[in-house]
Image (cartoon, helix red, strand yellow):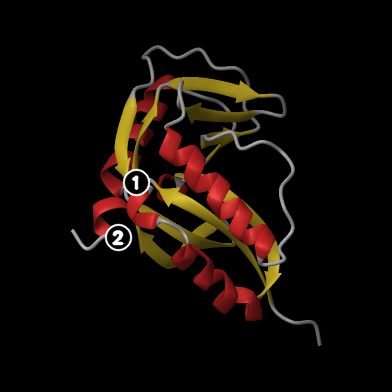
Amino acid sequence: MQPEKLRLFFALPCAPAMAERIDRWRARQHFVGHLTPRANLHLTLAFLGHLPAEQLTMLERIPTGLALAELACELHLDNLACWRGGLLHLAPSRAPANLLRLARELELALVAAGLPSDRRPFRPHLTLARGSRPPIASEPADFAWQADELVLYQSLQGRYLPLRCWPLGDKAAGG
């Protein structure tokens, strides 16, 4: 019998109030394609793919070795774009240094744990839709929130289920 495999990724969640605000803005733009459900809006830091369920304990230890108290950041998503292949997304015009550091430290810790590395450069983005095309927005994108939590998610039948959360910044420092 094959061991159970889970489709996993580390990400910064989009707080429910911000996800609702982005969703309302997105609806007014009339974008085409398969829209990302509001509850699934997030910014991926590391996609892990399908891993055996028995690796969960090891994965849950990885963030504890990072300097989480130093890695909160304000995300400012103000650049609307569509990559070749139809991935419509919001991205920061300038990625915060702490966001880049968090992604880099997480990637290094995953590699040190023996997990395969995604060789593509980290391009922070929040996916709005798949199968879309270059957008024409009637309102500019301008969304900002404090990223103060790192989450290990499981992707299961179109839903992203948080398995474990770690506070960032003051929350990690006990403040």
Question: The N terminus appears in which quarter of the rendering?
Answer: bottom right
15 sits left or right of 52 in the view:
left
Between the C-alphas of marks 1 and 2, the distance is 9 Å
161 sits left or right of 104 in the view:
left
Q: Is residue 162 visible?
A: no
Looking at the picture, does residue 149 appear above or below residue 25?
A: below
Question: The C terminus appears in which quarter of the rendering?
Answer: bottom left
**Residue 51, percent from left and from top:** 69, 69
Proximity of marks 1 and 2: CB atoms separated by less than 8 Å: yes
Looking at the picture, does residue 25 appear above or below residue 3?
A: above
Q: Label 2 belongs to which residue?
A: 172
Alpha-carbon neighbours of circle 2 within 10 Å: few (<14), some, or many (≥20)? some
Pick out the residue farthest to the bottom. 1
**Residue 158, percent from left and from top:** 57, 56
**Residue 70, percent from left and from top:** 35, 49
Q: Label 1 belongs to which residue?
A: 72
SS type, badge 1: loop
Q: Earlier in the sequence, mark 1 or mark 2?
A: 1
| Amino acid type assigned to the residue bearing label 1 in the image | Ala
74 sits left or right of 128 in the view:
left
| Quarter holding residue 5 | bottom right
